[in-house]
Amino acid sequence: MVNLEQLVCLTNELVASIEESDGYIFLDRFGEGPARLREKILTYATTEEAQGWLNIVLIDQSISQIVGDDWDLARRH
């Protein structure tokens, strides 16, 4: 079984670095750093809402391969 520390290390290597903000975990897949991530978080009503929307984009390439690029959630937000 993988513990949290191992998961963080694996995620940092394969997907994105992990940043914590107000007790919520965010995946910084573009390597923008904590300051830029905080700016993005502040565009949402709550940190919880930001976490849901900002972390969901990890699957965007897979969805685009299946249904094309017109599905982009960012255009609807």
Image (cartoon, rainbow, N blue to C red):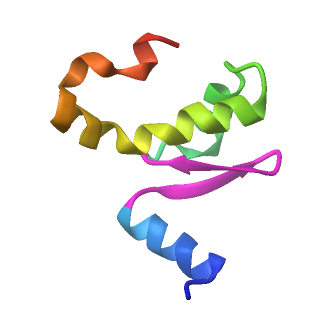
Outermost residue, front direction? Answer: 67
Q: What count of labels does the image hold?
A: 0
Q: Quadrant of residue 74?
A: top left
Residue 63: x %, y % from top left? 27, 36
Residue 55: x %, y % from top left? 53, 42
Q: Residue at x 51, y 47 (%)?
A: 28
Residue 45 covered by magenta stretch? no
Q: Which residues are magenta?
A: 15-30
Q: Nearer the viewer, residue 29 or 60?
A: 60
Q: Is 17 situated left or right of 39 in this image?
A: left
Residue 20: x %, y % from top left? 71, 52
Outermost residue, bottom direction? Answer: 1
- Seen in the picture, residue 65 relative to 69 is either above or below; the reply is below
- Seen in the picture, residue 55 relative to 17 is either above or below; the reply is above
Q: In terms of secondary structure, what is the magenta stretch mainly?
A: strand
Outermost residue, right direction? Answer: 22
Q: Residue at x 76, y 33 (%)?
A: 47
Q: Quadrant of residue 46?
A: top right
Q: Residue at x 82, y 45 (%)?
A: 22
- Seen in the picture, residue 57 relative to 3 is either above or below; the reply is above
Q: Nearer the viewer, residue 4 or 30?
A: 4
Q: Residue at x 56, y 88 (%)?
A: 1
Residue 18 covered by magenta stretch? yes
- Seen in the picture, residue 28 relative to 63 is either above or below; the reply is below
Q: Nearer the viewer, residue 26 or 69?
A: 69
Q: Is 36 situated left or right of 65 in this image?
A: right
Q: Is 69 situated left or right of 44 in this image?
A: left
